[in-house]
Image (spheres, rainbow, N blue to C red):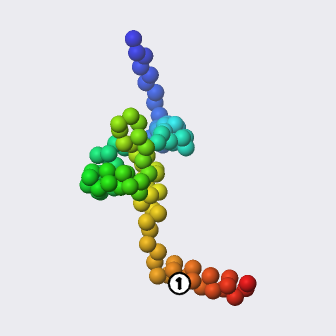
């Protein structure tokens, strides 16, 4: 049988108690830094990358995209796909000019 507890708290005391309880719950729910790698099958990876499945198969057969095989299944790690997408970043004109200036300065110093 459950026990009931009737307590007389002021509104301020009740709010303080509730805030502390919520703070403890939120602390317990914080990620520990350990994440499980999200694994995609071909359809999920194609959807994630917004590619056609046939395009994804072509890229894997030409070894243009990171993937691995388990039996007959092609699998993809989300973090590797995100890194692959980031590799294709086109530099802004400002970034290119900055790199050119750095190169010229370093060349003069040599």
Residue sticking out furthest to the bottom: 108
Count all numbered tags in the image, as a single digit: 1
Q: Position of residue 57 (x, y in %)?
A: 31, 50
- Residue at figure coordinates x 55%, y 43% from the top left: 33
Crowding near pointer 1: few (<14 within 10 Å), some, many (20+)? few
Of the 4 image quadrants, the one containing the C terminus is: bottom right
Q: Is residue 39 visible?
A: no
Quadrant of the rendering where the N terminus is positioned: top left
Residue, far front: 62
Q: Nearer the viewer, residue 30 or 40?
A: 40
Query: Can the viewer see residue 32?
Result: yes
Instruction: Report which quarter residue 89 is drawn in.
Output: bottom left
> Residue at point 43% right, 66% down?
88
Indicate the position of residue 3 as horizontal and vertical percent values.
43, 16
Say if 46 sits above or below 10 in the image: below
Residue 14: where, in percent of width, then height? 46, 38
Q: Residue furthest top?
A: 1
Closest to the observer: 30 or 95?
A: 95
- Residue at image x 44%, y 58%? 84
Residue position for label 1: 97
Viewer-nearest residue: 86 or 110: 110
Residue with the most extreme right position: 110
Query: Where residue 32 sits: x, y (%)?
Result: 55, 40
78 to 86, vertically: above or below: above
Q: Is residue 29 left or right of residue 59?
A: right
The residue under the point 36% across, 55% down is 59
Helix, strand or loop at mark 1: helix
């Amino acid at each position: 049988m459950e026990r009931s507890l009737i307590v007389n708290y002021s509104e301020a005391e009740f709010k303080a108690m509730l805030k502390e309880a919520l703070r403890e719950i939120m602390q317990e729910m914080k990620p520990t830094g350990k994440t499980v790698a999200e694994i995609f099958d071909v359809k999920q990876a194609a959807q994630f990358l917004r590619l056609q499945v046939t395009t994804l198969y072509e890229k894997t057969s030409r070894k243009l995209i990171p993937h691995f095989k388990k039996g007959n299944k092609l699998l993809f790690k989300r973090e590797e796909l995100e890194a692959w997408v980031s590799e294709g970043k086109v530099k802004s004109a400002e970034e290119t000019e900055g790199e050119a200036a750095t190169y010229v300065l370093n060349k003069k110093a040599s």
